Image (cartoon, rainbow, N blue to C red):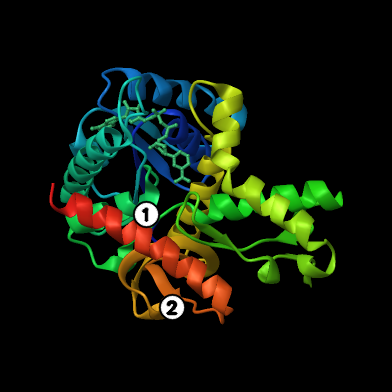
Amino acid sequence: MSFPSCTQFRVSVIGAGNVGSALAQRVAEKNLADVVLLDVIAGRPQGLALDLMEARGVERHDRQIIGTNNYSDTAGSDVIVITAGIPRKPGMSRDDLLRTNAKIVRETVKSAIAHSPQAVLIVITNPLDVMTHLAWQASGLPPHRVMGMAGVLDSARFQTFIAMELDVSIADISATVLGGHGDLMVPLPRYSTVNGIPITELLPESTIERLIDRTRNGGAEIVELMQTGSAFYAPASSACSMVEAILYNKSRLLPVAAYLKGEYDLNDVFIGVPCRLGCQGIETVLELQLTETERNALHTSARSVRENVASFTAL
Ligand code: TXD
């Protein structure tokens, strides 16, 4: 009698900050894969990994969590998640921040992919859509194996605000947000439903606009409350759902920043659209029928991403 061979998935999380460490916890404690947590700071990923390992007896799982400063420990990863970057420091301009994070993302992607050329790459570092494009260029991977996480988070935030407004269970709510991550995101109320009923049938337009505004400012609202640092629990959950869909070939339809080749009349740009995720990465980009207004909003969003990418490609 022969036993099926064991598949042991490995996920490497580059950047052991707030998002990276919360994601490592989610992936390990959901029993999805072994996790390698890497950071430039000596000791930090090792300490976090040991802490997560010590939680295993209570959480009852057998996943291994390794902390390291060395890319060779990430070898053979099935999925690599990039969260590395620096937050804005006093006196630093937005452009300085972008330039620094662009350098970090390019370097970390090159080092990680060198050890895991078969991996699927998920980018989280902001500004998300631009960093995803730079990561793709640095990786040399086919575009379907590179994607950015933002749409799942933005949709989750929209879902939360709809559930709060209607006082119904979050379990019954499904929301769709397309476009770039930030001011130019494109929430789609027509495709946001409570057990199949579009919210446009349940809420007045002015209320929907208020919920959309809150979704657009969802990240800023949390930064303002926390003062130091930004959201990490919901971002980690969002990234974890993408990791799970890829590792377990789930064919989930999730909004992610994907490279477009003519879909939505857009070319050579990473932007948030609904995609079917499976073990190959992005298996299909779903093209929704958009209204003129929605289409214009998506194109405005894509134009802004493209302009930012162009300013960085020269660096
Ligand atoms: O929806 C989304 N995409 C986002 C994006 C949601 C939440 C957070 N978003 C962005 O993710 C955020 O604006 C940041 O750009 C990243 C990571 O956020 P996090 O809150 O985790 O930032 P931290 O806590 O500052 O962590 C960053 C870590 C920190 O430990 C650094 O030491 C490390 O990155 N870092 C590096 N690791 C490896 N290699 C290099 N070069 C490096 N540089 C910094």
- Identify the residue at horizontal 25%, vertical 50% (top origin): 76
* Circles 2 and 1 in contact, beta carbons < 8 Å: no
Q: Please state which of residues 65 and 252 is positioned toward the viewer in this rendering.
A: 252
Which amino acid, by three-letter code, is at mark 1? Asp
Q: Observer-nearest residue: 75 or 240?
A: 240
* Position of residue 113 measured from the top left corner of the image (x, y, whole percent): 21, 50
> Which residue is more in the foreground, 153 or 236?
153
Q: Which residue is mark 2?
A: 264
Residue 214 in sight: yes
Q: Which residue is at a point 36% across and 64% down the rendered structure image?
A: 303
Left or right, residue 219 beside residue 90: right
Amino acid at pointer 2? Tyr
The tally of labels here is: 2
SS class of the residue under badge 2? helix
Residue 205 in the image: state x and y as whole percent: 77, 62
Residue 177 is left or right of residue 131, and the answer is right
Residue 132 vertical position relative to residue 141 in the rendered view, above or below: above
Looking at the picture, how far across and down is residue 278, in whole percent? 44, 67
Residue tagged by mark 1?
Answer: 129
Q: How would you rate the neighbour count of disc 1 (Cα within 10 Å): few for under 14, some for 14-19, many for 20 or more?
A: many
Q: Is residue 307 above or below residue 188?
A: above
Is residue 289 placed above or below 11 in the rendered structure? Answer: below
Question: For the residues marked 2 and 1, what is the alpha-carbon distance in whole angstroms?
Answer: 16 Å
Relative to 245, 142 lies left or right: left
SS at badge 1: helix
Q: Is residue 139 at least partly visible in the picture?
A: no
Q: Closer to the N terminus: mark 2 or mark 1?
A: 1
Q: Residue at x 32, y 29 (%)?
A: 86
- Rendered-image quadrant of the N terminus: bottom left
Q: Which mark is residue 247?
A: none
